[in-house]
Image (spheres, rainbow, N blue to C red):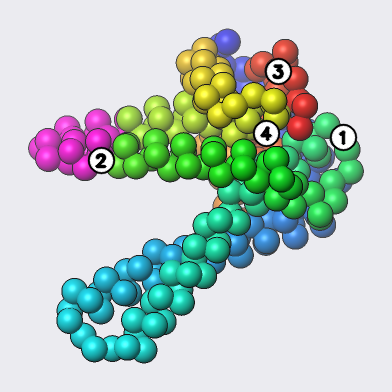
């Protein structure tokens, strides 16, 4: 599909309308997501603190205990973060369908079926990002061009992955491989549109409370460029 600015414009309007119609639920959900993400980030802080204490051979028991507590809290956040993110995507799609979004919809990813699906998706995603990080580190040894090649690869990988979680949420009877493959195929056929949608979606998410607006925009773009994709979420 050729790049069509009208699709961008119409998607922005549709996403904005969904956001306005469900603004309270969306803002509360965005705040919950950020809190959980912040808690999850404590895992890295805690591990780093423990490592610093051990590597410096310091007998700072209090620091080590504090680091351990942060790591444990972070683990809890890491466990909860995927289902909450899954629920946030579900809320954005629900609003686009013209349905009333409730604050409790953020818990959609925490039911017996979707919680496992969300973990599977994010485990696969983290694995992909880990492999990419290793490749980027290796490319870093190449003078001048290494960083540029890594940047280009990052743009390609992120663009190919952009629609995958939408598809995963929209097709609850399909597995993560299906969602990833479909996302890649859609991005290959609509690379410029997908790239622009990813950038604009990220910009719309900057204010934190507008994260659902950015997600809704991405979801509407997907629905417009692949109108045959059924939303069964």
Cα distance, mark 3 to mark 2? 34 Å
User: Is disc 2 placed on a helix, strand or loop?
Assistant: helix
Residue under numbered circle 1: 98
Disc ID at residue 169 = 4
Mark 2 → mark 4, Cα distance in angstroms: 29 Å
Closest to the observer: 167 or 189? Answer: 167
Residue at disc 4, secondary structure: helix
Q: Earlier in the sequence, mark 1 or mark 3?
A: 1
Q: Residue at x 32, y 74 (%)?
A: 49
Cα–Cα span, label 3 and label 4: 12 Å
C-alpha span from label 1 to label 2:
43 Å
At mark 3, the secondary structure is loop
Q: Which residue is mark 3?
A: 229
Q: Is residue 154 magenta?
A: no
> How would you classify the magenta stretch by its main secondary structure?
helix
Residue stretch rendered in magenta on the structure? 134-152
Position of the N terminus by quadrant: top right
Question: Relative to residue 77, is residue 65 depicted above or below?
Answer: below
* Mark 2 Cα shell of 10 Å, populated few (<14), some (14-19), many (≥20): few
Q: Residue at x 32, y 30 (%)?
A: 152
Q: Crowding at label 1, few (<14), some or many (≥20) Cα neighbours within 10 Å?
A: few
* Distance from Cα at disc 1 to Cα at disc 4: 17 Å
The reply, left or right, for residue 126 in relation to residue 137 is: right
């Amino acid at each position: 599909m050729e790049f069509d600015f009208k699709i961008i414009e119409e998607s922005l309007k549709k996403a904005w309308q969904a956001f306005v119609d469900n603004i309270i639920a969306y803002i509360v959900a965005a705040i919950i997501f950020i809190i959980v993400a912040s808690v999850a980030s404590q895992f890295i802080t805690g591990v780093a603190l423990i490592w610093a204490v051990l590597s410096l051979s310091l007998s700072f028991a209090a620091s080590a205990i504090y680091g351990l507590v942060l790591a444990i809290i972070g683990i809890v956040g890491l466990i909860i973060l995927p289902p909450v993110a899954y629920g946030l995507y579900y809320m954005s799609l629900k609003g686009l369908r013209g349905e009333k979004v409730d604050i409790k919809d953020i818990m959609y990813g925490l039911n017996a079926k979707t919680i496992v699906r969300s973990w599977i998706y994010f485990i696969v995603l983290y694995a992909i990002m880990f492999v990419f990080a290793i490749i980027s580190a290796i490319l870093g040894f190449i003078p001048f061009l290494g960083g540029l090649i890594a940047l280009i690869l990052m743009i390609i990988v992120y663009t190919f992955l952009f629609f995958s979680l939408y598809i995963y949420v929209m097709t609850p009877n399909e597995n993560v491989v299906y969602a990833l493959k479909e996302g890649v195929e859609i991005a290959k056929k609509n690379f410029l549109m997908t790239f622009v949608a990813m950038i604009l979606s990220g910009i719309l998410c900057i204010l934190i409370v507008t994260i659902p607006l950015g997600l809704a925009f991405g979801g509407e773009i997907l629905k417009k460029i692949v109108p045959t994709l059924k939303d069964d979420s």
